[in-house]
Image (tube, rainbow, N blue to C red):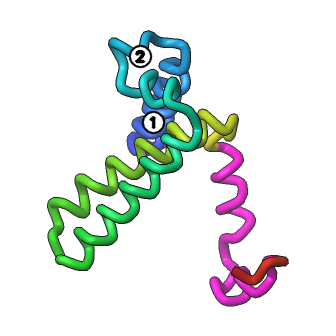
Amino acid sequence: MSETSEILDRLFETIRERKNADPESSYTAKLYAKGSKKIAQKVGEEGVELALAAALKDRDEVISESADLIYHMFVLWADAGVDPAEIYAKLAERQGLSGLVEKASRSDNS
């Protein structure tokens, strides 16, 4: 396991553990307490902020907003009962496929 994947795995485990923490002492627990809609909203906000940083070619903000997006995405996964291994498996399934071929194979063609 690489150092990067260990960092991500530790982050996810910490986020999952905070589900039952006191919302007064943990931002993560506070997000869980606000519910799935708020968590999803935060993921959307962070995605927009990342896109804007990229459009402005602000490298430091791209890094910072990427970290924020990953964190909030992990909260969303944990809230939804999704394990990162499921995401990794989906990525592995798609590896080697042309992005256009993979997208066309989806039933909704989104």
The residue wearing badge 2 is 23
Asked if 81 appears above or below 48 in the picture, the reply is above
Q: Which residues are magenta?
A: 85-106
Name the front one of labels 1 and 2: 2
Q: Are marks 1 and 2 in contact (CB under 8 Å)?
A: no
As for residue 7 lying within the magenta part, the answer is no
| Count of all numbered marks drawn on residues in the image | 2
Q: Where does the image place residue 80, in percent across and percent down from the top left?
A: 66, 38
What's the magenta bit mostly, secondary-structure-wise? helix
SS for tag 2?
Answer: loop
As for residue 102 lying within the magenta part, the answer is yes
Q: Residue 29, located in which quarter of the rendered image?
A: top left
Q: Where does the image place residue 102, in percent across and percent down from the top left?
A: 72, 81
The residue wearing badge 1 is 6
Q: Residue 77, located in which quarter of the rendered image?
A: top right
Q: CA distance from mark 1 to mark 2?
A: 26 Å
Please name the amino acid that badge 2 sits on.
Answer: Pro
